[in-house]
Structures are given as structure tokens and as C-alpha cells.
């Protein structure tokens, strides 16, 4: 479907804003997702601070041309752009939706820390636990020796009494 030059300028301006402000951009292939699922997914993404919209691949290529290092991943089929000022959130959320809506949504690639990433790299980035989970893991790591020491002291105290 052809779109007017004015509409293309609006889309290019929006892609330019995404390019300048987003810390992470994820290119997502989607096909066959019904309207209610799409609406629910967009609402959930919006609640988590992730924006998502669909644009023509030629407009994406024009907007992102020369903006990032590396080579832009091959974008085949219907492509949506998920973006956020938080570097991890878009990839993690799109990975969740890719597992929830199998064969309808998949990560194609993206931009992370100013460089294009392919599908495998973006999925690897999405697999990194959230900051809260990492903090909990760190606290457990620090607490573990003290906990073991307490168990040993309790065992020694039990043998002496």
C-alpha cells in the first residue's frame, strides 16, 4: 500500500527520534498475530516503557543509514521496531513474546550500544537477567560464605554440647 510523502516524512522523523534517543532497538518479525494479541502486547510493552511501531523497511534503512556501526541485519517480512531508553528491556520483552507467540513473533536483530547486532547476539542480550535479579544473585553470593560459616558453627556447637 502506497503512503504519501507527508506520511513518510512523519515516519522518518519518528525513526530519527528513536535513533537519537533509544539505548536499544530491536527489529522484530511478526506475522499472523491477531488484533487482540497485538493490542495486549503493545499495552504491556507501553507499561514497561517500551515503544513499538511498524514502518517500511526502506524507510528504516534510510533513517538508520550510517547511524550505527556494523552491518544492518537482513530484514525480511513484516518488521516492527521495539525501542526503549533502557538498554535491556526491549530485547527481554520481545524474547518473552517470541516464546509466548511461537512462529508469529521472532527477533531478527537490533541495535545495542550503538552497533548493529544479529539475531543470535540480540537473543543472547535478551537472556541476561534483569538488574534486580542480578542484585539478588550478588547478595546471595555475598551472603553464602556467612551462611555456610553459621552452619559449621552450629554443627560444632552441637557436637560440643
Image (cartoon, rainbow, N blue to C red):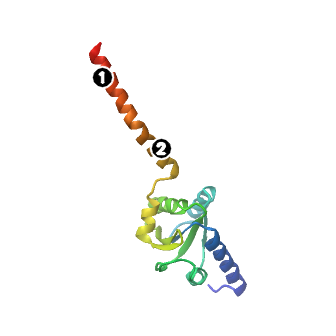
Label 1 – label 2 distance at C-alpha: 27 Å
Q: Can residue 113 be seen in this view?
A: yes
Seen at 52% across and 76% down, the residue is 78
Question: In terms of image quadrants, where is residue 103?
Answer: bottom left
Residue at the spot 30% in from the left edge and 17% down from the top edge? 158
Label 2 neighbourhood size at 10 Å, few (<14), some (14-19), many (20+)? few
Most distant residue in the left direction: 159
Q: Which of 48 and 114 is in front in this view?
A: 114
Label 1: element kind: helix
- Residue 5 x/y as whole percent: 70, 87
Nearest the eye: 24 or 4: 24
* Residue 115 sits above or below residue 136 on the image: below
Which residue does the numbered mark 1 point to in the structure image?
155
Where is 138 relative to 63, above or below?
above
**Between disc 1 and disc 2, whose residue precedes?**
2
* The residue positioned farthest toward the right in the image shown: 6
Q: Which of the two discs, 1 and 2, sits closer to the camera?
A: 1
Q: Across the whole image, how many numbered discs are drawn on residues?
A: 2
Q: Quadrant of residue 35?
A: bottom right
Residue 31 seen anywhere in this rendered image of the structure: no
Comparing 148 with 2, the one in front is 148
Task: Evaluate if marks 1 and 2 touch, with contact meaning CB atoms under 8 Å apart.
Answer: no
Q: Quadrant of the C terminus?
A: top left
Which one is in front, 25 or 76? Answer: 25
Q: Mark 2 points at which residue?
A: 136
Amino acid at each position: 500500500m502506497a503512503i504519501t510523502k507527508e506520511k513518510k516524512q512523519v515516519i522518518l522523523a519518528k525513526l530519527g527520534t528513536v535513533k537519537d534517543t533509544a539505548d536499544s532497538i530491536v527489529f522484530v518479525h511478526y506475522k499472523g498475530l491477531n488484533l487482540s494479541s497485538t493490542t495486549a502486547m503493545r499495552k504491556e510493552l507501553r507499561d514497561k516503557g517500551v515503544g513499538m511501531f511498524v514502518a517500511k523497511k526502506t524507510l528504516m534503512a534510510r533513517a538508520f543509514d550510517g547511524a550505527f556501526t556494523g552491518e544492518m541485519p537482513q530484514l525480511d517480512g513484516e518488521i516492527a521496531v521495539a525501542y526503549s531508553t533502557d538498554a535491556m528491556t526491549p530485547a527481554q520483552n520481545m524474547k518473552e513474546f517470541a516464546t509466548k507467540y511461537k512462529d508469529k513473533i521472532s527477533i531478527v536483530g537490533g541495535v545495542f550500544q550503538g552497533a548493529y547486532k544479529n539475531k543470535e547476539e540480540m537473543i543472547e542480550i535478551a537472556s541476561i537477567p534483569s538488574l534486580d535479579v542480578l542484585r539478588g544473585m550478588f547478595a546471595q553470593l555475598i551472603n553464602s560464605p556467612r551462611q555456610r560459616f553459621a552452619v559449621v558453627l552450629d554443627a560444632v556447637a552441637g557436637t560440643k554440647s
